[in-house]
Amino acid sequence: MNPLEIITRKRDRQKLSREQIFFLVDNFTAGKIPEYQFSAFLMAAILNGLDTDETFHLTEAMLYSGKSVVFKKTDHPVYDKHSTGGVGDKISLTLSPLLVSLGINIAMLSGRGLGHTGGTLDKLESIPGLNPFWSEAQIKSRLGKTGLAISGQTDKIAPADKKIYALRDLTATVESIPLITASILSKKLALKTDGIIFDIKVGSGAFMKTRRQATQLARSLLGVCQKFKRPAGCLLTDMSQPLGHNIGNYLEIMETVEFLKTGGPDDIRQVTFRLAYEIMRFQKPGIDRKKTYQQFSEAIESGRALSKFREFVKISGGKTGPLDNPKRYFKPQVSAIIRSEKKGFLHQFNTELIGKAALELGAGRRHIDDKTDPMAGIVIYKKLGQKIGKGEIIFRLYTSNKSVIGPVRKMLGDSVKIGKEKIASPKKIITLITR
Amino acid sequence: MNPLEIITRKRDRQKLSREQIFFLVDNFTAGKIPEYQFSAFLMAAILNGLDTDETFHLTEAMLYSGKSVVFKKTDHPVYDKHSTGGVGDKISLTLSPLLVSLGINIAMLSGRGLGHTGGTLDKLESIPGLNPFWSEAQIKSRLGKTGLAISGQTDKIAPADKKIYALRDLTATVESIPLITASILSKKLALKTDGIIFDIKVGSGAFMKTRRQATQLARSLLGVCQKFKRPAGCLLTDMSQPLGHNIGNYLEIMETVEFLKTGGPDDIRQVTFRLAYEIMRFQKPGIDRKKTYQQFSEAIESGRALSKFREFVKISGGKTGPLDNPKRYFKPQVSAIIRSEKKGFLHQFNTELIGKAALELGAGRRHIDDKTDPMAGIVIYKKLGQKIGKGEIIFRLYTSNKSVIGPVRKMLGDSVKIGKEKIASPKKIITLITR
């Protein structure tokens, strides 16, 4: 077997075998196949496609390039939730303590924010003292202790993915359903959970701009999960506007705490509850939605959800002050407001542009090594379909970098379309795909 | 402009501009774009294609990466001939002295053999003392003096091609009409000749296995030549069997001398005369073919063609003994014969396999740095369509490496199909394409 032969097969639209895919991935990861050959393969794979079998084998090869984390069997099932990434998406943080407070354990490996989307790790790190990088032993023991493990990925998980992703990023081979599938699942499947719920974001702030693309990704993820015999479901949710009101690391912690205390804002609750419900259905497919949502509300009202989050913050070394009095810890250097220039109804957001504005303010990172500003971000006061008066505040922004306020004003101004007609606000839950 | 943007455009089937193509080629050649990005571009270009404009700009960018050779204007036009490569193809050597003896100057940059096809430079070097690597100044002055310049390519000609070709070879991006076109023409156009005739080989011993592929290449070459305003024509000739009887470096010099003395063998004469005639038609489109062929025969019979070759060999530092008494200089170490195992008619050659057998014997090279054995090679006694008796000799092989005789016997045995029915021998000239 040699790399040239395998690249040639894919170039000529022939199907690759498990052995051929493992040969490529193993040798590339070991540094025995040069980057220029692997990037030619990636481009051929993007343009000629990989079928479900090939995507499965690619996922296997990437997954088995590293270690898996196996949990002790207990009475509590362990589930994982993955979002394809959006703006203002703090659902990992709202969902996990809620479910754990109801006896469903949650384990997830999270990532840093990159580009216009935020990352759970950056949000957690905005809590003073909190270290979200756990060892494998800590992941296991803390899950056993508290029922909740959210940690940064260790180097031992799918090292092939890390190396392949870095190359894809530089060779215009990111946008490919099979490659995205293998990248997501090689990491997700390394945690031996009892099932995974995928939150696939659709719309102007998501990687999948259309429902058609999102459906393709859902079917690809489910097809490969099935081959691994891992229960999975995909919820398509709306990303035509940011989730909640707050975008930015500490700002999203504040909104998480708000949710755990009050159950709001509305859109956060809808998405959180539905994802939590779908996870509960992995175990009991027949449960009633209304009754389950009632349980969720009770877990919030009783303070049990928040107290699970408190446990998690504590065990991670974080101060719990921000959970008691979030505003006290919010210390942005500069702020500015953006008002509407006309009256009407909020017709459209360019959500990706809003994400990029938050990045400019310091909330995100362009390169994986950039530092983020925990206090930077944006608060959005209006949602799609809402009435707005001339001069009303739409955005408030926070940053420690005064010089970006001018450009960000322009970006945020450009990100909104206000029209005369009343329009309906978009549904948060688009559809559930389970096979 | 950045490379990622340009790769993305080609991946998404968008047309690239002249500026974008120059940016890629210039920066790759200068080492500023890494190989892994350029190979992703190459794969995208292969799979999504390059149109005539893009191929033209790619050719320009590669051509202008190096120098051009401009000749002094004289009464003698200067033409170039290029073959896409075949087995036993010594037409550059038979054609050039013939035309030069008739007042048509010939200048060509030739290459080494690689894989199953031979190279003009290796053949020339089998003449003791001959150095086919001329400086630019020598190319010009010797062309002025003798009317004939055949030289190895200098490093100053299209350095981008050299670098790109090395990468294509390792990334399964060789087989692409636009990339082949740009590679050939970036070198050919660097010699400022008055026109180029392309001998496009078709069949089992050629890179283009079908007439359809060969026609595509012809149209691509002509399309780009037209944009450069360089007169050009493409002759499609048969490579379903080796050209002539001799394959191997010195063996082909012997056959060249045979042609220059006697006008034979028949297939060599047919291809040489037709290509020579098409070159003469660049100047005088209306000339009569029969009369021109008559002139060719006279140039041979009078000894003028051979004496031009003698001049060329002398000026290149070579001994002329091999022209006077070729056999005296043929000193192979070992030889063997291969006989037919049955009687019938010669139905088919696997010409590529014959080329590979010659390579095994030492006549060719697998890697560009390998050394060749000047005396190694194969003589073929039978041509397609000929009657053959059981036990008749089909091949005689020569080598200095005894250990390969066994495997080569097998290869050559496998390369021939003998059938019962009489069949016609294939036409040497398939068609002429001029636009």
Image: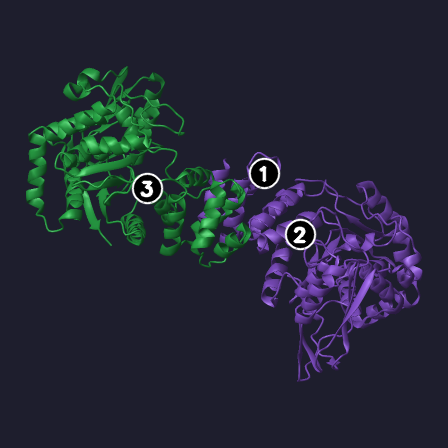
Chain colours: A green, B purple
Left or right of A91, for residue B345: right
**Real-space CA distance between mark 1 and mark 3, rounded to the nearest whole angstrom:** 39 Å
Q: Are marks 1 and 3 in contact (CB under 8 Å)?
A: no
Give percent across and percent down for residue A47. 44, 52
Q: Are marks 1 and 2 on the same chain?
A: yes
Rendered image: mark on residue B184 = 2
Amino acid type shown at disc 2 = Ile
Mark 2 element type? helix
Mark 3 element type? loop
Give percent across and percent down for residue B22. 58, 40
Q: Is residue A53 visible?
A: yes
Give percent across and percent down for residue A141. 25, 31
Left or right of A393, for residue B327: right
What is the quadrant of residue B211 in the picture? bottom right
Left or right of A425, for residue B96: right
Q: Label 3: which residue?
A: A190
Dot 2 surroundings within 10 Å: few (below 14), some, or many (20 or more)?
A: some
What is the chain identity of the residue bearing mark 3?
A: A
In the rendered image, the quadrant that contains the C terminus of chain B is: bottom right
